[in-house]
Image (cartoon, helix red, strand yellow):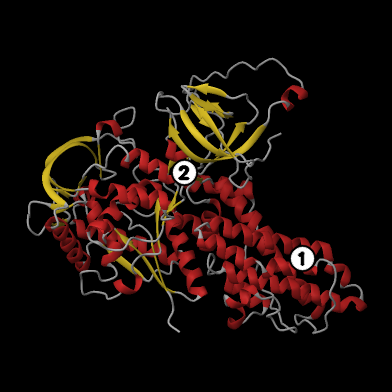
Amino acid sequence: MEKKPFYITTPIYYPSGNPHIGHCYTTVACDSIARYRRMQGYDVMFLTGTDEHGLKIEQKAAEKGVTPKEYVDEVVKTFKKLWSYMNISYDRYIRTTDDYHIETVQKIFKALYDKGYIYKGEYKGKYCTPCESFWTESQLDENGCCPECHREVTEAKEEAYFFKMSPFAERIEKLLTETDYLQPKTRATELVNNFIKPGLEDLCVSRTTFKWGIPVTFDDKHVVYVWIDALSNYISALGFWNEQYNDFDKFWPADVHMVAKDIMRFHAIVWPAMLMALDLPLPKHLAVHGWITFNGQKMSKSLGNVVDPFILGERYGADAIRYHILREMALGADSSFSNEIMINRINSDLANGLGNLVSRTVAMADKYFGGTLPADREAGDFDAELIAEAEGLVAKVDEFMDKTQINNALAEIFKVVSRANKYIDETAPWVLGKDESKKARLATVLYNLLETIRIVSTLLSNFMPTTMPKVWEQIGATESDITYENAGKFGVLPADVTVHRGEIIFPRIDVDKEIEELNKIIGSNAEPEEKADDGFEPAPIADEITIDDFAKVDLRVALVKDCEKVKKSKKLLCLQLDDGFGGRQVVSGIAAWYKPEDLIGKKVVIVANLKPVKLCGVESNGMICAADTPDGAASVIFPDQDLPCGAKLR
């Protein structure tokens, strides 16, 4: 039977510098989904690549005294080296300097021009070279700088071609609000209110002030500007309007485009508009993730605060890094990177959790039965619960992978790992091993543990592809035992399975020692405890209260489902929250420090039992908890993102 196609893409990365841990998240996430779909039997096309044109590349090359092509050739080698190191199983790697892609882009540009969707005009406005972005005056930050990287912008005035966006506004609004194209859906309101409702502005799609780009065939003064060039990669890589490949009819429309939130607008609005203008089907899903932040800022080359994944991988292995970034990042929300968070996650989940489970189980099978279990069995307490959780795991993982919620899929797997470790404590194999009459019961306990390990490691192989084969070797699993079909069955290993003791798959790390060493190498995410005088004077401690007084304040964890500015105020944001009991609306005076889109998908702490008040005519049912910073800003308190909505603080 012919396999069902599945097409997933990363954004194509801009090779103005070496890749960092932020690039890793998107690519590892897509790789995990691609591997999972292959395991399920899909015919997968997994695309990644590099976006190699633009002014910044031209400038970087000039600084180094090489041509732009020579410059990107060297950087692309580093990207490919990292993807190999991180075990990225991409099927195709596209470079926008590839001849076939250039052919497709030129044909698309001409087709849109012939249809009247592209026209010649003059661009006037602000331009940020590091971000390769045009901005209007109103879009700049409070210092008149780029709203993305906060660097200075330059005045730009030049002849340019523009893509008409307004004809597609109504269809795009319906796409965002009435379909499940955008994930998470909470982003739709932000896009509609900020870009569609005010009127879609035409998009500048050519430049004359630099030459490193794809020439416009009918006007050689112009090169194609980034978005028509970059976005077209998703179809040029399949052979659309070129002879390089012949996969367009098979794989288009894409099942998943995964991007970070800083390029969400272009994929949620510009790309659908281009496809509509070309009368092509739209992608099925756009999965938008947040940023990996460092010291509270987006991690990016423009900001100079990146973390080198090669350094981390050398110390902990690629699989540990893959697991950490996948487990920490929730779709739509930012994830804070720190050395301490990473090491604690590796210790708690991989060393103490999975590694301990494998090590203990295999060691006991070797100690009590010489490595080969007897076929005799005796059921007992706790068996049914463990078996049910293990057998039901694949359905739960399927559900979350279908929603691109990889962190939740991993959480479900590690719930079963925790249950298996608890099962060891409940059944006490070391006690059973002392009683000859309990050998059948002991064999049953160890078999149940080996089967549970087989199931979780089969599923985890999509996320940690290097380590899981080592687990299979230790538990005596063969290739036929570790299929997707067998991941939902209990009792696949032979009754007399033979185990093989091996190395510890995830050694425990000395946290304090390792953090000290790691901070020397890549820097600490934490502010030093002793700083130069910053002029900050803490507010005086309030009058003492009793514990009964404090108990009257009901502090709860809530999820920000939606957020927008209050129209009559420059200071207020209106947040729609899930507090575990339903929806609630809270107005908060934090607009000077937070954009609405940066709060959506995050968990916050609220005072839940304040009496409702109206602020600028908008009702507020509670208060967002925040702290004062030395410069007088408000810093919202973000609790552990694993805490459930409605969790009470005490």
With respect to residue 602, does 330 lie above or below?
A: below
Q: Which residue is pictured at 28% across the width and 60% down the height?
A: 74
The answer to whether any part of residue 507 appears in the image is no
Q: Is residue 307 left or right of residue 378?
A: left
From the image, tell me which residue sits under label 2: 293
Residue 611 x, y percent position in the rendering = 62, 24
Q: Which residue is pictured at 87% across the width and 78% down the height?
A: 439
* Amino acid found under the numbered disc labelled 1: Glu
Q: Which residue is pictured at 22% across the width and 57% down the height?
A: 277
With respect to residue 325, does 236 lie above or below?
A: below
Q: Which of 475 and 423 is in front in this view?
A: 423
Q: In this view, does 338 lie to the left or right of 649?
A: left
Q: Which residue is pictured at 46% across the width and 43% down the height?
A: 293
Q: In this view, does 454 lie to the left or right of 630?
A: right
From the image, tell me which residue sits under label 1: 385
The answer to whether any part of residue 195 appears in the image is yes
Marks 2 and 1 in Cβ contact (< 8 Å): no
With respect to residue 261, does 246 lie above or below?
A: below
Residue 240 x, y percent position in the rendering = 24, 69
| Residue 602 - label | none
Q: Nearer the viewer, residue 231 or 371?
A: 231
Residue 450 x, y percent position in the rendering = 71, 73
Q: Residues within 10 Å of mark 1 (few under 14, many from 20)?
A: few
Q: State how far apart marks 2 and 1 are (Cα).
A: 40 Å
Q: Closer to the observer: label 2 or label 1?
A: 1
Residue 161 x, y percent position in the rendering = 14, 48
* Amino acid found under the numbered disc labelled 2: Thr
Q: Which of 141 and 164 is in front in this view?
A: 164
Q: Give the SS element for disc 1.
A: helix
Residue 412 in which image quadrant: bottom right
Q: Can you say which quadrant of the picture contains the N terminus? A: bottom left
